């Protein structure tokens, strides 16, 4: 048991550096000040995007934004 604990502690820095991708599905119409489709179509803009990016910045995760109708976003969950 002690060997497993020591092995886990030794490998923890390598495991914690893994980039996990989180998908954020959004509907761009009608949510203008909070989130809307960006001008280039790849990165949305708005307050919600700024807050999510700021929260994810110190963590080893990546956010992938996906534009879809609301019912399709619900089905993807």
Image (cartoon, rainbow, N blue to C red):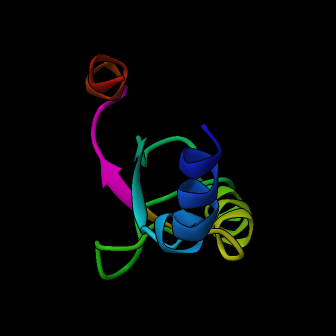
Q: Residue at x 57, y 50 (%)?
A: 3
Seen from the viewer's position, the closer of residues 29 and 70 is 70
Question: The C terminus appears in which quarter of the rendering?
Answer: top left
Q: Nearer the viewer, residue 34 or 30?
A: 34
Name the outermost residue toward the front. Answer: 2
- Whether residue 44 is in magenta: the answer is no
Q: Position of residue 66 (x, y in %)?
A: 31, 52
Q: Which residue sits furthest bottom? A: 40
Q: Judge whether 43 appears above or below 1 on screen.
A: below
Instruction: Answer with left or right where residue 42 lies relative to residue 6.
Output: left
Q: Is residue 42 above or below residue 24?
A: below
Look at the image and give the residue range highlighted in magenta.
64-70
| Identity of the residue drawn at 58% across and 69% down | 10
Does residue 27 appear in the picture of this structure?
yes
**How far across and how far down the image is residue 2, in percent?**
65, 45
Residue 8 location, quadrant: bottom right
- Tally the numbered discs: 0
What's the residue at 30%, 73% (across, down)? 42
In the rendered view, does 66 fall on the left or right side of 6?
Answer: left
Q: Is residue 32 above or below residue 51?
A: above
Q: Quadrant of the N terminus?
A: top right
Where is residue 64? Give x, y as percent. 37, 61
Closer-to-camera residue (41/55): 55
24 with respect to 35 (left or right): left
Residue 60 in view: no
- Residue at 31% of width from left, 50% of height from top? 67
- As drawn, 47 above or below 2: below
**Residue sitting nearer the eye, 56 or 14:** 14
66 in magenta: yes
């Amino acid at each position: 048991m002690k060997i497993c604990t020591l092995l886990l502690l030794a490998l923890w820095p390598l495991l914690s550096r893994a980039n996990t991708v989180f998908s954020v599905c959004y509907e761009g119409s009608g949510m203008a000040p909070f989130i809307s489709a960006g001008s280039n179509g790849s990165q949305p803009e708005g307050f919600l995007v700024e807050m999510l990016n700021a929260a994810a910045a110190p963590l080893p995760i990546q956010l992938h934004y996906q534009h879809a109708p609301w019912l399709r976003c619900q089905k993807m969950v």
